[in-house]
Amino acid sequence: MKKIFLGIALIILCQSCFSYKAMDNDPTKMETGKTYKIKQNHKYSKVVFHDVKDNTILVSEDFEEKQIPINDITDIKKRKFSIVKTVALPLSIITGLVGLFALSYN
Protein backbone atom coordinates (compact mmCIF):
# COMPACT_ATOMS: atom_id res chain seq x y z
CA MET A 1 0.00 0.00 0.00
CA LYS A 2 2.86 2.37 0.85
CA LYS A 3 4.49 1.64 -2.51
CA ILE A 4 1.28 2.56 -4.32
CA PHE A 5 1.00 5.91 -2.54
CA LEU A 6 4.71 6.56 -3.13
CA GLY A 7 4.18 5.88 -6.83
CA ILE A 8 1.18 8.22 -6.93
CA ALA A 9 3.14 10.96 -5.16
CA LEU A 10 6.03 10.53 -7.60
CA ILE A 11 3.72 10.81 -10.60
CA ILE A 12 2.15 13.99 -9.23
CA LEU A 13 5.48 15.59 -8.34
CA CYS A 14 6.95 14.89 -11.79
CA GLN A 15 4.21 16.80 -13.61
CA SER A 16 5.39 19.83 -15.53
CA CYS A 17 3.68 23.14 -14.89
CA PHE A 18 4.71 24.50 -18.28
CA SER A 19 3.98 23.72 -21.89
CA TYR A 20 5.49 25.09 -25.08
CA LYS A 21 3.31 26.90 -27.61
CA ALA A 22 4.35 27.34 -31.24
CA MET A 23 4.98 30.88 -32.42
CA ASP A 24 6.12 32.63 -35.59
CA ASN A 25 9.72 32.06 -36.65
CA ASP A 26 10.43 35.74 -36.04
CA PRO A 27 13.12 36.27 -33.38
CA THR A 28 12.25 39.98 -33.16
CA LYS A 29 9.00 38.96 -31.39
CA MET A 30 10.90 37.06 -28.70
CA GLU A 31 10.97 38.59 -25.20
CA THR A 32 14.23 39.06 -23.30
CA GLY A 33 14.62 36.71 -20.34
CA LYS A 34 11.90 34.27 -21.45
CA THR A 35 12.50 30.55 -22.08
CA TYR A 36 12.04 29.09 -25.56
CA LYS A 37 12.59 25.83 -27.39
CA ILE A 38 14.43 26.48 -30.63
CA LYS A 39 14.71 23.82 -33.33
CA GLN A 40 17.83 23.82 -35.44
CA ASN A 41 19.35 20.92 -37.38
CA HIS A 42 16.42 18.64 -36.40
CA LYS A 43 17.17 19.14 -32.67
CA TYR A 44 15.35 21.20 -30.03
CA SER A 45 17.33 23.27 -27.53
CA LYS A 46 15.84 24.85 -24.40
CA VAL A 47 17.28 28.37 -24.23
CA VAL A 48 16.79 31.71 -22.49
CA PHE A 49 16.60 34.54 -25.02
CA HIS A 50 18.78 37.64 -24.55
CA ASP A 51 19.12 39.69 -27.73
CA VAL A 52 18.96 39.84 -31.55
CA LYS A 53 22.16 40.95 -33.29
CA ASP A 54 22.39 41.24 -37.08
CA ASN A 55 21.62 37.73 -38.36
CA THR A 56 22.03 35.90 -35.04
CA ILE A 57 20.25 35.65 -31.71
CA LEU A 58 22.07 35.65 -28.38
CA VAL A 59 20.77 33.00 -25.98
CA SER A 60 21.99 31.05 -22.98
CA GLU A 61 21.71 27.27 -22.83
CA ASP A 62 22.89 25.36 -19.74
CA PHE A 63 24.39 28.60 -18.31
CA GLU A 64 26.48 29.08 -21.48
CA GLU A 65 25.93 32.00 -23.85
CA LYS A 66 25.56 31.04 -27.51
CA GLN A 67 24.90 32.78 -30.79
CA ILE A 68 22.47 31.00 -33.09
CA PRO A 69 22.20 32.07 -36.75
CA ILE A 70 18.61 33.05 -37.58
CA ASN A 71 18.81 31.11 -40.87
CA ASP A 72 19.41 27.85 -38.93
CA ILE A 73 16.21 28.20 -36.86
CA THR A 74 13.33 26.09 -38.20
CA ASP A 75 10.90 26.32 -35.26
CA ILE A 76 10.41 28.44 -32.14
CA LYS A 77 8.20 27.48 -29.19
CA LYS A 78 7.53 29.79 -26.23
CA ARG A 79 7.23 28.40 -22.70
CA LYS A 80 3.84 29.11 -21.16
CA PHE A 81 2.42 28.32 -17.71
CA SER A 82 -0.28 25.66 -17.95
CA ILE A 83 -3.12 25.63 -15.41
CA VAL A 84 -4.33 22.29 -16.81
CA LYS A 85 -1.01 20.55 -16.21
CA THR A 86 -0.60 22.14 -12.79
CA VAL A 87 -4.05 21.56 -11.28
CA ALA A 88 -6.41 19.49 -13.41
CA LEU A 89 -4.11 16.63 -14.38
CA PRO A 90 -2.89 15.72 -10.86
CA LEU A 91 -6.41 16.23 -9.50
CA SER A 92 -7.89 13.88 -12.09
CA ILE A 93 -5.20 11.27 -11.38
CA ILE A 94 -5.94 11.41 -7.65
CA THR A 95 -9.70 11.22 -8.23
CA GLY A 96 -9.31 8.25 -10.55
CA LEU A 97 -7.06 6.38 -8.14
CA VAL A 98 -9.36 7.04 -5.17
CA GLY A 99 -12.25 5.75 -7.29
CA LEU A 100 -10.30 2.59 -8.15
CA PHE A 101 -9.48 1.97 -4.49
CA ALA A 102 -13.12 2.52 -3.53
CA LEU A 103 -14.28 0.03 -6.16
CA SER A 104 -11.68 -2.57 -5.19
CA TYR A 105 -12.71 -2.56 -1.51
CA ASN A 106 -16.45 -2.90 -2.21
Image: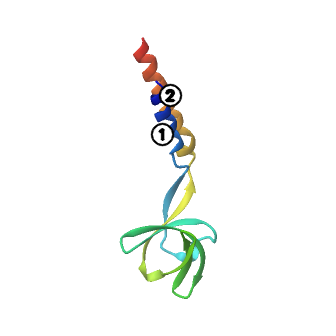
Residue found farthest to the front: 2
Residue found farthest to the bottom: 54
Circles 2, 1 touching at the beta carbon (< 8 Å):
no
Q: Three-letter amino acid code at disc 2? A: Thr
Q: Secondary structure at mark 1?
A: helix
Kindly indicate the quadrant of the structure image that contains residue 49.
bottom right
68 versus 32 height, above or below = below
Residue at left offset 54%, top offset 38%: 88
Residue at left offset 56%, top offset 49%: 17
Q: Secondary structure at mark 2?
A: helix
43 versus 83 height, above or below = below
x and y, in percent, of residue 45 in the image: 46, 68
Which label sits on residue 11?
Answer: 1
From the viewer's side, name the closer residue of 25 and 90. Answer: 90
Residue highlighted by disc 2: 95
* CA gap, disc 2 and disc 1: 14 Å
